[in-house]
Amino acid sequence: METKQKIIVVGSCNTDMVIRVDHLPLPGETIIGHNFITNQGGKGANQAVAVSRLGGKTAFIARLGNDDFGAKSLRLLTEEGIDTSCVHLTDGVSTGVAIIPVDDKGENSIIVSSGANALLSSTDIEAAKPLFQNASILLMQLETPVPTLISAARLAKSYGAKVVLNPAPYPKEPLPSELLELVDIITPNETEAAGMSGIKVVNEDTAFEAISAIQRQGVGMVIITAGASGAYTIIKGQIIRIPSTKVEAIDTTAAGDTFCGAFCVALSKGADTVEAIRFANKAASISVTRIGAWMSIPYEKEIL
């Protein structure tokens, strides 16, 4: 019998258009950029690629537009070694697109047009049921409809898989308890943790308060990613900070997605939580030294 190590990623796939700028534009401001690149992206696709490159076995469930961007994305996902049997090309709608200015400090702003991502449905999840039978982890984000994520989480739980949710981009409305109560591990960054808890995370004490508030919403484990400060979690009632590797960041695009994919790979191979976070921190630290989304995601040999 196949060992349950497969990681299923349900989520978005976009074409990213990245441009370097001296500073992020203010409202009404026109600035001159440079070094324009087109890159594959979307939080779901980023995380699926991270899983595959970092030594995991993954399947991706997504919708693309039946256009040039979609055809290219599907081909490149397959070339990454990802099971794309449940990635569907959709007529009459565009593939998702993201416009990303990146400043000289590596910070970015992202504007996303969802396109086909918004059409991923519970019917797509039901059609993918055979994938879940040998899955150990389901990894999701918030660039596809929440009802679809609830359906995926229910199916994953029915087969005994862990459900990991990266709550990004954080929605204007609070996440429903119907979803949060199905989540085993949630991985917000500091901004998303503040949105969920009402507490600004600036140190270990405030991280403890924020994590505790989020856990009271029904989530099992909370891991707050804090960029250069590393990551926070609570284990056996104690707050723990796992530091990151110090690097010079030039672009933070896909750093959180790289962290999530790496974390799930380590968990699927039997690592404990702290070991998995250390592995994920290393992967994310490498990604911020490179420009772009998929282009920045490292391979397992680079971590080792």
Image (cartoon, rainbow, N blue to C red):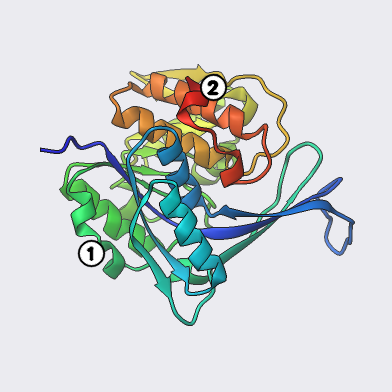
Q: Farthest residue to the left: give it.
A: 1
Q: Is residue 208 visible?
A: no
Pinpoint residue 229: horizontal percent, then vertical percent.
61, 23
Crowd around label 2: few <14 · some 14–19 · many ≥20 (10 Å): few
Q: Farthest residue to the bottom: give it.
A: 92
Camera-side residue: 107 or 174? 107
What amino acid is labelled 1 in the image? Glu
C-beta proximity under 8 Å, tags 1 and 2 = no
Pinpoint residue 111: horizontal percent, then vertical percent.
66, 60
| Relative to 33, residue 283 above or below | above
Q: Residue at x 52, y 62 (%)?
A: 72
Count of numbered circles in the view: 2
Q: Is residue 47 left or right of residue 20?
A: left
Camera-side residue: 255 or 191? 255
Instruction: Give the label on residue 126, or none.
Output: 1
- Please tell me which of labels 1 and 2 falls first in the chain: 1
Q: Is residue 207 visible?
A: yes
Pinpoint residue 56: horizontal percent, then vertical percent.
36, 36
What amino acid is labelled 2 in the image? Asp
Q: Residue at x 32, y 40 (%)?
A: 57
Instruction: Give the label on residue 181, or none.
Output: none
Camera-side residue: 222 or 82? 82
Q: Residue at x 46, y 18 (%)?
A: 240
Instruction: Give the label on residue 205, or none.
Output: 2
> Toward which corner of the image does residue 148 lie, by quadrant?
bottom left
> Toward which corner of the image does residue 274 lie, by quadrant?
top left
Q: Residue at x 45, y 31 (%)?
A: 223
| Relative to 48, residue 209 above or below | above
